[in-house]
């Protein structure tokens, strides 16, 4: 019984560590999604959406692009690697939506998608 309790405590501590490591890059990504939603030009929308991707994937991510900057540079290795395994798929879906929004040629649609991304990250 003591072993089970110790294992449970370690699992809870590990989950809390994941959440703490991922919270700040997720918050920063959400802020940049909001900036994309309010941007005045397509290049600004795209730059802020790239910031979202950079914060979520981290520098080892397949879609990471340091060119437009990395607002999460000092926040670890990205929200996806820092998240608990059961949270990663939702964040990967946000990255996929951000990639689609970056390709959108209608700025109004891209900004709507950015607002949706911000809402998704607030969940």
Image (spheres, helix red, strand yellow):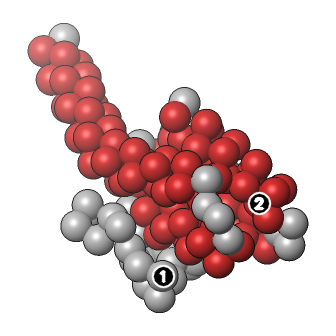
73 sits left or right of 37 in the view: left
Residue lying farthest front?
40
Q: Position of residue 80 (x, y in %)?
A: 46, 56
Determine whether 99 is above or below 6 in the image: below
In the picture, residue 100 is in which quadrant? bottom right
| Observer-nearest of 42 and 100 | 42
What residue do we see at 54% from left, 66% from top?
48
**Which mark is on residue 110?**
2
59 sits left or right of 15 in the view: right
Q: Secondary structure at mark 1?
A: loop
Which numbered disc, 1 or 2, marks the residue that appears first in the sequence? 1
Q: Position of residue 62 (x, y in %)?
A: 56, 78
91 sits left or right of 111 in the view: left
What residue do we see at 26% from left, 63% from top?
76
**Which mark is on residue 68?**
1
> How would you rate the neighbour count of disc 2 (Cα within 10 Å): few for under 14, some for 14-19, many for 20 or more?
many
Residue lying farthest top?
1
Tell me the quarter of the image containing the N terminus: top left
Q: Secondary structure at mark 2?
A: helix
Tell me the quarter of the image containing the C terminus: top right
| Observer-nearest of 48 and 24 | 48
* Real-space CA distance between mark 1 and mark 2, rounded to the nearest whole angstrom: 18 Å
| Observer-nearest of 86 and 27 | 27
Res. 39 visible in picture: yes
| Observer-nearest of 9 and 94 | 94
What residue do we see at 52% from left, 34% from top?
122
Determine whether 123 is above or below 96 in the image: above
Determine whether 79 is above or below 68 in the image: above
Res. 89 visible in picture: no
Q: Position of residue 52 (x, y in %)?
A: 52, 61
């Amino acid at each position: 019984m003591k072993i089970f309790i110790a294992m449970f405590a370690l699992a809870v501590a590990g989950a809390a560590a994941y959440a703490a490591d991922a919270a700040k890059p997720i918050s920063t990504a959400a802020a940049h999604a909001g900036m994309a939603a309010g941007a005045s030009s397509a290049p600004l929308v795209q730059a802020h959406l790239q910031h979202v991707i950079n914060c979520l994937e981290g520098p080892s991510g397949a879609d990471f692009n340091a060119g437009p900057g990395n607002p999460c540079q000092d926040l670890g290795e990205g929200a996806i690697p820092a998240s608990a395994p059961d949270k990663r798929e939702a964040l990967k879906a946000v990255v996929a939506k951000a990639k689609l929004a970056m390709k959108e040629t209608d700025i109004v649609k891209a900004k709507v998608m950015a607002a949706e991304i911000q809402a998704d990250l607030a969940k």
